[in-house]
Image: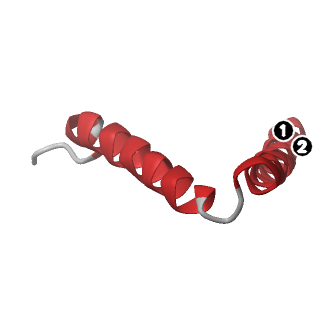
């Protein structure tokens, strides 16, 4: 249990650091307008993953 908790905390910290890094690069290279496009790409990816996993995530009873 302790190892799993440590891995979870590490994964969250890496995700936060990665988001900050990518956000900083987007802001530096493309300005604030890039965030709208990046958000749409991330939302489309989340929608696609949710749509593909709907049978397993929400089984019919």
Task: Please tell me which residue is depicted at 76% across the width and 57% down the height of the picture.
Answer: 27
Q: What is the spatial separation of the Cα atoms under label 2 and label 1, in whole angstroms?
A: 4 Å
Return the residue at label 2: 6
Figure quadrant of the N terminus: top right
Residue contact between numbered discs 2 and 1, judged by CB atoms under 8 Å = yes
For the rendered model, the colour scheme is secondary structure
Return the residue at label 1: 7
Q: In the picture shown, does residue 28 fall above or below 51?
A: below
Q: In the picture shown, does residue 23 fall above or below 49?
A: below
Task: Please tell me which residue is depicted at 88% across the width and 36% down the height of the picture.
Answer: 3
Task: Please tell me which residue is depicted at 50% across the width and 53% down the height of the picture.
Answer: 37
Task: Please tell me which residue is depicted at 79% across the width and 42% down the height of the picture.
Answer: 11
Q: Please provide percent x and percent y for residue 45.
A: 41, 41
Q: Please provide percent x and percent y for residue 32.
A: 67, 65
Q: Please provide percent x and percent y for residue 60.
A: 11, 45
Q: Nearer the viewer, residue 31 or 17?
A: 31
């Amino acid at each position: 249990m302790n190892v799993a908790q440590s891995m979870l905390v590490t994964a969250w910290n890496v995700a936060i650091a990665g988001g900050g890094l990518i956000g900083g690069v987007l802001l530096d290279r493309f300005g604030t307008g890039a965030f709208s496009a990046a958000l749409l790409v991330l939302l489309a990816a989340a929608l696609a993953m949710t749509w593909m996993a709907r049978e397993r995530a929400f089984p019919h009873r």
